[in-house]
Image: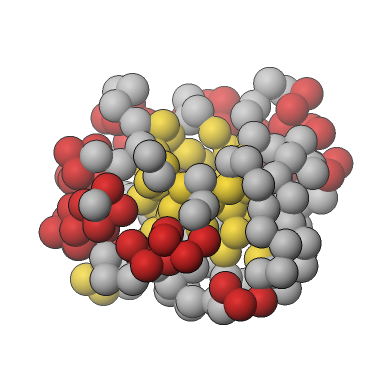
Amino acid sequence: MTFVKICGLSTPADVDAAVEAGADAVGFVMSSRSPRHVTPALATTLVDHVAGRALTVLVTNDLPVDEAVTQAVATGVDVLQLHGPAYDAGAFAVAAEAGVRTWRATSLAQDPHPRTGSHGEDALLLDSPVPGSGHRWSAADLTTRPTGRWLLAGGLDPDNVAAAVAELAPWGVDVSSGVESSRGVKDHTAVQRFVAAVRA
Ligand SMILES: O=C(O)c1ccccc1NCC(=O)[C@H](O)[C@H](O)COP(=O)(O)O
């Protein structure tokens, strides 16, 4: 069964909508310039609200790795998603030394031949170059398809996700702006439609 992560949640009602729709994971973004940014206090509240009903993922692209690890531990998330070129293999080693499980988010522009686990990560998320933008990258450019635990992301929505899954057979999918009514505001009906489309 395809794993589903709904990313960029910022209220307890968002969490309930994702979990009740059947999402496997929920993501909380800690990135100063994101419309989905959550403070450490809010992230902790949201993780507590999940209460084990889904995997919790802290996502960042601009925190120094030490700070990201500190926040992952403090908020109690299951996984730290280090997103983009700021994080090299050394950064993943820092997280591993602290006992923090990681996912690595990259794009074909950054990493033309992405390989799950190349930085010691538990899963790979293949995204567009601008995270959370809804930009759809071309699967035709994917010459080497990752194997193992990899998630497809970037421009997915309830109407295109089934075809994307059929075409690329990823281990999982991730969505943010494709299930929003306006930037940073989750549309709970769209969340439900997205998960149902993947499951169907
Ligand atoms: O969503 C953000 O604003 C964001 C900001 C900084 C780093 C990562 C961010 N999102 C991470 C995700 O995993 C998104 O779900 C992924 O980029 C897909 O986004 P979308 O194309 O909008 O579905």
**Residue 89 in the image: x percent, y percent?**
83, 44
Above or below residue 57? Residue 31 is below
Q: Quarter-wise, where is residue 100 in the image?
A: top right
Q: How many marks?
A: 0
Relative horizontal placement of residue 23, taking residue 122 as reference (left or right): left
Relative horizontal placement of residue 66, taking residue 170 as reference (left or right): right
Please name the residue shown 79% across and 44% down the image.
118
**Residue 43 in the image: x percent, y percent?**
40, 39
Above or below residue 134? Residue 12 is above
Relative horizontal placement of residue 180, taking residue 170 as reference (left or right): left
Please name the residue shown 63% across and 54% down the image.
105
| Residue sitting at the far left | 189
Q: Nearer the viewer, residue 166 or 92?
A: 166
Relative horizontal placement of residue 100, taking residue 35 as reference (left or right): right
Q: Quarter-wise, where is residue 148 in the image?
A: top right
Residue 66 seen in this snapshot? no
Above or below residue 111? Residue 133 is below
Q: Nearer the viewer, residue 55 or 164?
A: 164
Q: Nearer the viewer, residue 168 or 128?
A: 168
Tell me how the rendering is colored. Answer: secondary structure
**Residue 75 in the image: x percent, y percent?**
47, 30
**Residue 54 in the image: x percent, y percent?**
34, 31
Please name the residue shown 31% across and 53% down the image.
198
| Residue sitting at the far right | 90
Q: Quadrant of the N terminus?
A: top left
Residue 172 seen in this snapshot? yes
Please name the residue shown 41% across and 61% down the image.
166
